[in-house]
């Protein structure tokens, strides 16, 4: 191992479930030199970033900030800040990330109730209401897009039900945001967290989060200012202190707010990336971005079918930006993935849990939600399937994808 | 507020207590396009990064990884992973960051014992042993360099004491590493965490951590694999589950280890930055880097004295890379800081807690541990002090700094 090897990553085309190839403008943004954390230019960038993510999330929530960590850090920040030990939390599970919300909630001390539906399907409003009535949770934690199954969970009905029954409503929209519709305020969400490394088109390492007034009020009741920077004007909240310092969203809000109370040192390069991601997507227009994801995803699906491959799950609920492909019996799934990577520089994904070894996952996200990347993936896959003895109509995948993409226009 | 303003940070010279101006090579590293998290090139970079930080930390610990978050994330990962609720933790406090270790330990459920010495001094071995004997803690958590006071806590004696009394020994060396000596194995440390944004010369957002075999064993007893990726071969540990998922160092080790068990999605751009920081420092040579910090720090101190300014604290225990300057009574400290920033593009720091408004903090760290940055800072400060009515011998600071810097050679 040469420790001093010069950094020179190969030019992969990342067509997996994420992370994906980053928009060049985002890489350029990260190349900018740092400024201090309380520099007025920096606090100006922070305020812009809050405003930009309000538009990404479609919300008027003041409390819209970045958590410095990966998407999972955003999830944990929301859950540990909202959950007090003993609180009942309802987590519907339709894939791996439901399990994750449940386990993070458990570690935060929640009394977690889960119910699972078959991987490849989503949860209905009727199922949800039954469970809400039965368990009377304080919080519903529901994934929007679960890349492990490619499913997109409808949230609108869940928001209605939560309001009706007085339940706080949180969604992790990391895998789905800007590739599919998302409406924080219209769908009556109290908390949402995402990451940059899917359709937003940035690197992993920053987690935008938004909180409703009600969620903020709950967090404020658990306020605690650190010794060492605490003054007489700081009063502690009435309720139990949040179990994490790093993920205490009250403290994070005070750092992003007018008091600019010191907490962590903002990860400036990641903030530059997050800000640029939001600008890029809003400048293209969210409707256009979602449409581009839909057209790329549909073209890919059409091409895969033309290769004679079956797609996984309830396609009426598939995310635009990722598809599960049943690995045909005549190939070694891992050997094909390896050849895609080493011979074509194209990365496609494997799977977790019950789907491990059964499906590939192919993503069309952010910068790579384009026709050319779809076509390259299809013709490369065609070559490898033919090589493995697949009987495939030559050129059909190309034609199907091009036709499907154009229909979208 | 123009949300679509093009990113264009002003060319600040960051001479505060951190974050500091980043090495240009590190910015260039972050401009590289992503690759997938299980790409063999990526896992190769991860293995290199582990090996590079073993050299930075001066350790043979296998368990040397990055936590994806700021320095504070590294602190919390170590503490929440090592502390079981009810464990007694001893935290000597000689500045703000001792309070921070205490508060993070409390939130992790520890029974925390603190003892405080006057800000501007450090803790003696005799004080430490008395407290260890009295309280019999499981863990000693001790900051090495506390930027709030500029003090550098000696750790060698503490390591001896911990071994003698069977106490786990953790230090946060974020502010001091590579600007001052640090010896993980020689000083018998069980856990160390740092950040990039001080002398390592990178941006905030990645926290290198190293753990001794004994610390790893303790963490392994609390092992837990997530539902959704758990298989029959995964056995749960005997002891209480770690209270955080994101900061569960057992899971983070499994992600960095041979099994490559999925946890978070590695923050690739920050890993590129962390890797480049380590390469840069090791290529210069750790002894040379520390010497450069010492010469720059000494030159700055000599120049400040020649400006008629008093330096804060017990200077025999000052970190090489930051100095506290008593704000002279004839100036408005904040007005001078503002003028340094707006007229000269030089940032110097303010203070926290009992020192707020009393001292400035000036850093010479990483890329900015150079004679030219020291001289620019001194002549700018001289101009502003003279403007405020200070009686200063013209050119004395320049001369004192140059002479002191050259002595170092």
Image: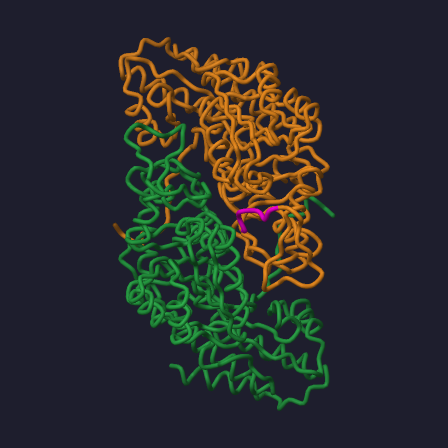
Chain colours: A green, B orange
Report the predominant secondary structure element of the magenta stretch: loop
Q: Position of residue B165 (x, y in %)?
A: 68, 24
| Left or right: B144, with A331 as reference point | left
| Left or right: B62, with A226 as reference point | right
Q: Quadrant of residue A188?
A: bottom left
| Residue drawn at point x = 33 percent, y = 19 percent | B383
Q: Quadrant of residue A260?
A: top left
Look at the image and give the residue range highlighted in magenta: B240-245
Q: Position of residue A367 (x, y in %)?
A: 47, 65
Of residues B217 and B278, the one nearer the viewer is B217
Of residues A287 and B105, the one nearer the viewer is B105
| Left or right: A157, with B137 as reference point | left
Name above or below for residue A322 compared with residue B26: below
| Residue drawn at point x = 65 percent, y = 20 percent | B157
Quarter in which the C terminus of chain A is drawn: bottom left
Tally of marks: 0
Q: Position of residue A193 (x, y in %)?
A: 41, 57
Name above or below for residue A163 compared with residue B207: below
| Left or right: A162, with B229 as reference point | left
* In the image, residue B104 lies in the stretch drawn in magenta: no
Name above or below for residue A65 compared with residue A161: above
| Residue drawn at point x = 42 percent, y = 32 percent | B13
């Amino acid at each position: 191992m040469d420790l001093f090897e010069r950094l020179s990553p190969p030019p992969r085309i990342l067509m997996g479930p994420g992370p994906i190839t980053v928009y060049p403008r985002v890489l350029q943004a990260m190349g900018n030199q740092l400024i201090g954390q309380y520099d007025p230019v920096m606090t100006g960038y922070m305020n812009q970033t809050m405003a930009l993510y309000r538009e990404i999330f479609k919300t008027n929530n003041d409390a819209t900030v970045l958590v410095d960590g990966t998407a999972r850090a955003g999830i944990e920040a929301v859950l540990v800040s909202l959950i007090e030990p003993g609180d009942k939390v309802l987590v519907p599970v339709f894939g791996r990330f439901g399990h994750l919300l449940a386990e993070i909630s458990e570690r935060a001390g929640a009394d977690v109730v889960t119910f699972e539906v078959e991987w490849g399907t989503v949860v209905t409003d009727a199922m949800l209401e039954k469970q809400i009535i039965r368990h009377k949770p304080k919080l519903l934690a529901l994934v929007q897009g679960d890349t492990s199954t490619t499913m997109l969970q409808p949230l609108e009905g869940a928001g209605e039900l939560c309001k009706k029954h007085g339940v706080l409503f949180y969604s992790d929209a990391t895998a789905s945001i800007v590739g599919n519709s998302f409406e924080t305020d219209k769908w009556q969400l109290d908390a949402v967290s995402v990451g940059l490394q899917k359709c937003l088109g940035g690197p992993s390492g920053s987690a935008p989060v938004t909180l409703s007034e009600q969620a903020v009020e709950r967090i404020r009741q658990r306020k605690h200012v650190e010794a060492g920077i605490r003054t007489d004007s700081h009063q502690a909240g009435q309720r139990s202190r949040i179990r994490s310092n790093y993920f205490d969203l009250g403290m994070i809000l005070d750092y992003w707010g007018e008091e600019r109370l010191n907490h962590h040192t903002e990860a400036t390069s990641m903030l530059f990336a997050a800000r640029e991601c939001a600008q890029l997507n809003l400048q293209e227009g969210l409707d256009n971005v979602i449409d581009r994801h839909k057209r790329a995803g549909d073209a890919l699906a059409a091409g895969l079918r033309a290769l004679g491959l079956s797609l996984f799950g309830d396609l009426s609920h598939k995310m635009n930006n990722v598809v599960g492909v049943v690995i045909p019996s005549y190939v070694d799934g891992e050997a094909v993935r390896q050849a895609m990577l080493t011979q074509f520089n194209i990365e496609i994904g494997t799977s977790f849990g019950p789907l491990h070894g059964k499906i590939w996952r192919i993503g069309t996200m952010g910068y790579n939600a384009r026709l050319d990347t779809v076509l390259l993936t299809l013709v490369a896959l065609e070559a490898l399937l033919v090589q493995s003895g697949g009987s495939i109509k030559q050129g059909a995948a190309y034609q199907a994808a091009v036709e499907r993409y154009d229909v979208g226009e």
